[in-house]
Image: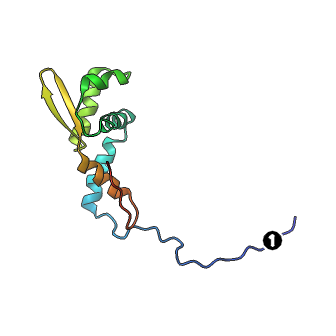
Amino acid sequence: MSKQELPVIASTDCCNTTLSSPLDAETATSLAGTFKALADPARLRLLSLIAAAGGQEVCVCELTPAFDLSQPTISHHLKVLRGAGLLTSQRRGTWVHYRVVPEALQRLADALVATGSTVTLT
């Protein structure tokens, strides 16, 4: 086999993927708690199911059949998501209805987007 020389391409764009303003310590701590709440597959699925309702409320009775988990376990996961500020809830009789907090999701999206980009959640 013969060796082939490859041309060196000078580029000023190389490795310029850092954020224009890195997260400060307080914001990083706050976001870490929110991401920690999402680090469980069941919680991530719960949030996804509620978000898929397009801003409408979802009753816990609609969520439970989608999982092979007990109702108390589902309620615990929903409590964690509420505590992280990702969901709001309203009790109606024996059932609790959940809704996504769009500003919380936007905050997470904004933290993950690189320099100068924006993401609009619908």
6 horizontally vs 26: left or right:
right
Which residue does the image show at 23% across and 37% down from the upper left? 99
Which residue does the image show at 31% across and 41% down from the upper left? 37
**Above or below, 4 relative to 75:** below
Q: Quadrant of residue 117?
A: bottom left
Find residue 19 and report its horizontal and vertical position in percent: 39, 67
Label 1 CA crowd tier, 10 Å (few <14, some 14–19, many 20+): few
**Above or below, 93 relative to 28:** above
Q: How is the image coloured?
A: rainbow
41 horizontally vs 72: left or right:
right
Q: Which residue is mark 1?
A: 4
Find residue 56 and report its horizontal and vertical position in percent: 24, 36
**Above or below, 63 relative to 118:** above
Q: Quadrant of residue 119?
A: bottom left
Which residue does the image show at 64% across and 77% down from the upper left? 9
Find residue 62 and report its horizontal and vertical position in percent: 29, 24
Q: Amino acid at mark 1?
A: Gln
- Tag 1, which secondary structure? loop
9 horizontally vs 28: left or right:
right
Which residue does the image show at 27% across and 21% down from the upper left? 71
The outermost residue toward the left is: 93
The image shows a total of numbered marks equal to: 1
Q: Quadrant of residue 28?
A: bottom left
Find residue 110 and report its horizontal and vertical position in percent: 33, 57
Quarter holding the N terminus is bottom right
